[in-house]
């Protein structure tokens, strides 16, 4: 993906894009590492941006696994739609992670196993972050895992108010380095 394309979207929407450049492939590998692709029936991705994590999810998922991709940025949505929109069991939604429960109902998904998030929780309004994580907990139930990356550990305590178990891993091969949070019951 063109660096200038991503940078342009960041300049126009800094609170929701949250980074100057796309995530590294190394970070993407760490983000999908906790996923059991053999058993996953449904994976949701919040804020895929240019699709670095999306690409890894598609390459590793079974053809029967449903992938819901939720992107709020109109430009990124159109790019993702043109790239992945015709693939089987992949649904690209122009909307907000705040309504993940409604999208799950819309696509008649019985159970969500994983939610992978590229959302910048440190720059999102607190009420929006709380709504997203509340809906995320409801959608995942007791068995699912929420996997998110952040550039600092500032939101770790915030995540702990929604999830009992949190594992944190630092990924140095990203600009800037990032922390991967794997959250569950």
Image: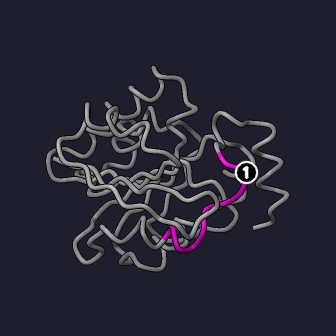
Above or below for 138 versus 29: above
Mainly helix, strand or loop, the magenta region?
loop
Q: Going by the picture, which residue comes out furthest to the top? A: 127
| Residues in magenta, as a range | 19-28
Query: Residue under circle 1?
Result: 20
Query: Looking at the image, which residue is at 25% across and 49% down?
Result: 166
Indicate left or right for 63 with 125 as reference: left
Indicate left or right for 135 with 84 as reference: left
Q: Closest to the observer: 128 or 79?
A: 128
Q: Position of residue 159 (x, y in %)?
A: 32, 37
Which quadrant of the figure contains the N terminus? Answer: bottom right
Q: Quadrant of residue 34?
A: bottom left
Q: Position of residue 76 (x, y in %)?
A: 70, 52
* Badge 1 density bin: few <14, some 14–19, many ≥20, Cα 10 Å: some
Q: Position of residue 19 (x, y in %)?
A: 67, 48
**Residue 132 inside the magenta-drawn segment:** no
Q: Quadrant of residue 113?
A: bottom left
Above or below for 70 versus 12: below
Q: Is residue 85 visible?
A: no
Above or below for 8 versus 22: above
Q: Closest to the observer: 185 or 67?
A: 185
Query: Looking at the image, which residue is at 72% across and 59% down?
Result: 79
How are the colours assigned in the image? Answer: one colour
Query: Looking at the image, which residue is at 52% across and 66% down?
Result: 172
């Amino acid at each position: 993906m063109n660096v200038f394309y991503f940078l342009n979207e960041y300049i126009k929407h800094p609170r929701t894009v949250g980074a100057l450049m796309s995530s590294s492939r190394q970070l993407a590998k760490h983000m999908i590492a906790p996923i059991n692709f053999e058993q996953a029936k449904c994976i949701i991705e919040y804020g895929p941006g240019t699709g670095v994590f999306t690409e890894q999810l598609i390459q590793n998922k079974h053809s029967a696994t449903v992938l819901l991709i939720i992107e709020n940025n109109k430009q990124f949505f159109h790019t993702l739609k043109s790239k992945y929109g015709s693939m089987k069991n992949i649904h690209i939604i122009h909307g907000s992670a705040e309504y993940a429960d409604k999208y799950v109902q819309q696509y008649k998904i019985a159970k969500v196993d994983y939610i992978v998030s590229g959302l910048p929780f440190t720059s999102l309004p607190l009420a929006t972050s709380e709504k997203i994580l509340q809906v995320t907990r409801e959608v995942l139930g007791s068995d699912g895992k929420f996997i998110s990356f952040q550039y600092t550990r500032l939101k770790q305590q915030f995540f702990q108010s929604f999830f009992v178990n949190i594992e944190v891993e630092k990924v140095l091969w990203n600009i800037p380095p990032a922390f991967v949070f794997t959250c569950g019951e």
